[in-house]
Amino acid sequence: MSTVAAAHDDHHHHAPTGLKRWLFSTNHKDIGTLYLWFSFAMFMAGGFMAMVIRAELLEPGMQFVDPEFFNQMTTVHGLTMVFGAVMPGFVGLANWMVPLMIGAPDMALPRMNNWSFWILPFAFTILLSSVLMSAFGAGHPSAPNFGWTFYAPLSTEYGPASTDLFILSVHMMGISSIMGAINVIVTVFNLRAPGMTLMKMPLFVWTWLITAFLLIAVMPVLAGAVTMVLTDRHFGTSFFSAAGGGDPVLFQHVFWFFGHPEVYIMILPAFGIISAIIPTFARKPLFGYASMVYATASIALLSFVVWAHHMFTVGMPLAGTLFFMYMTMLISVPTGVKVFNWVATMWRGSMTFELPMKWAIAFVILFTCGGLSGLMLAITPVDFQYHDTYFVVAHFHYVLVTGAVFSMFAAAYYWLPKWSGVMPSKLLGELHFWNSLISVNLLFFPMHFVGLAGMPRRYADYALQFADYNFWISIGGFWFGLSQLFFLALCLQCAMKKGEKAPAKPWDGAEGLEWEVPSPAPFHTFDTPPVVK
Amino acid sequence: MSDSNSLEARNKRTLKKLTIWAVAMFGFAFAMVPFYNVICDITGLNGKTSSTANTEAPSRLVEDRKVVVEFITQNGTGMNGDFLPASRRVEVHPGEITLVNFYASNPKSSNIVTQSIPSVSPGEAARYLHKTQCFCFDQQTLAAGERKEMPMIFYLDPELPRHINTLTLSYTIFDVTDRVAGINNNTVLD
């Protein structure tokens, strides 16, 4: 797509070392690395909570935790994974890759970049401290226990004291993501290398640009929602309190106005990653570049008019449910365009199956499974059966785990040579991939069946008829959780520079400016902007 | 770099625009509240009935049609006394003015102020239910140990859509004593 005619100077190394390097860093690569490690740490923390959930559900009846603690686990698991693992993971990838891909020397607002990262550890310390207090503190004060969607009145009238910790931490996470998003937009608008027109940008940059606009549009709405919960709790307002003339259903409208664009925030960058990897290993240019851009933009626009499909059962007028049903189904058109484009890119390509490609193909197939169950959920009358069952849990874990998380693994395997300068261990990589692929399906596929049979989500116990399925789901869960230790080992090896030295362009079919700089990417790149022809 | 000044200026401009947008979207979240209430008033979404008395008399009486109106009552936060309608179910002609008494009791040893919140199902019927008098229009004070009779007078709009044969009017009664006193009543439940 683009070629470079510029040499890179690697002459000035005045980077601070030690702790200061990381605390005060304004370098997009260092901040990207911080984001990625933070995301992985949160993935492990959220994963540990999932293990507690699956241990309790291994057998019917109560075994390990009481139902109250179980509710705290489901709540904080969701919050940690969404705001701690997936979103910062993608911001980390954007930090590392967007400047490299558009030939910029750094992010446009490096100090803000530092700030937007360093807010996060504090936000999650606040949130996760409530779990620690609940598990080990005197009197076991409850951590947030109302589900990650914090519906009123569960979070207002019935919310535990720690709800205020939750509100503060969500405000901080929101400020962090808004600043991260602003940084991406300013960088893409103002720092592109000469000749890098918008329609020449790699798709990862495009999808991130659109994601950043979504973030700026909806993260403030989430901030508004938590602010309303805060004032309802302490300052006598009644936004969501029927007693004072408010309406709890209003909460769901405000929340899902944020929440639906949010799910695309967590998947659009994944589309960009897959659109980078598949052409590399199929050795063909991406099929339908322009249609990919337009499809991404359509998905982003449609995401604002589908929110009420999360709340079909609140008693909306028929016309309302029909509108949201049709709009939701319409999203499958641009999404379908993307899937067909990926398949068409692979069609008659000279495919090889290196690790990034394996993850990318797994993404295409399994994300499509999640998309199909989403289409089923969009049908209003059948949603009355599926609503709040494990079918929904299966659906969003297929799109978020085998979708968003798999795409981040694909990205890590694809760009780790560039980040670390060494090729990741093939053995650990293969073990990680195959164990994850098999276990993740054992974990999430049977959830469709128990969901259709009527097992409700967010309960610490279940009817005896679901026992066999839940046993195997839990086994899949533990297996998937342990499989991630292979990835941890692989990342540590790369961080310690153990392994085969990586060339500047380790994948022979790869295109793009990031492969024009040496591996590992030097501290400063593109001081002189490359010229893109 | 020679153009660093202009680049910095451009960055600042973009930053400013995007920040304004983010702040505006924060405001938009709050603008959704009155917007939602207007939409509910117009469409009867969520079964919200009008909170003021209807002063118009029904235009006509539809004698050849009967509609079942059911009443549901429940105690909200802070309430633990009886809260019941005199009758759970009435059959009315659209346009027929009907009185139904509700009873609320306060078993506590102190006076309380209550507010009842109505909701109609199906929601689209809400704007066809006209109340000329309702205990829900105002806060009701219940003395300690008092059992109070609270009248509600309503009629159904003669234009009530034909497919609605049964509608349910639900009331939830809340203790709003602290709210009225201007005290934060959101005690944390542990």
Image: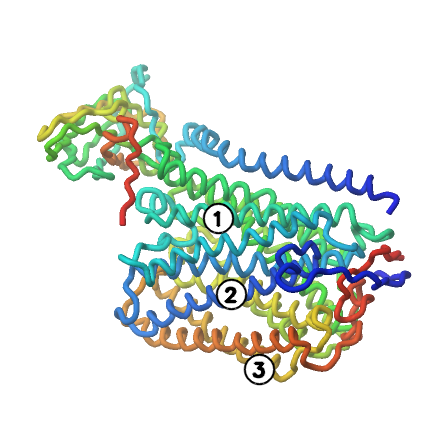
Residue identifier under label 2? A43
Sequence-wise, which precedes: disc 3 or disc 2? 2
Sequence-wise, which precedes: disc 3 or disc 1? 1
**Residue A336 seen in the current view:** no
- Number of numbered tags placed on the structure image: 3
A318 or A14: which is nearer to us? A14
**Amino acid type at mark 3:** Leu
Residue depicted at 90% across the width and 61% down the height? A6
Residue identifier under label 3? A431
- Please tell me in which quadrant of the rendered image residue A57 appears: bottom left
Asked if A211 appears above or below A12 in the picture, the reply is above
Q: Secondary structure at mark 1?
A: helix
State the residue lying farthest toward the bottom. A427
**Residue B180 seen in the current view:** yes
Label 3, residues with CA under 10 Å away: few <14, some 14-19, many ≥20? some
Asked if B87 appears above or below A205 in the picture, the reply is above
Q: Which mark is residue A170?
A: 1
A388 or A29: which is nearer to us? A29
Mark 2 → mark 1, Cα distance in angstroms: 17 Å
Mark 3 → mark 1, Cα distance in angstroms: 36 Å
Q: Subunit of mark 3? A: A
Horizontally, residue A232 falls left or right of residue A349, namely left
Residue depicted at 64% across the width and 48% down the height? A181
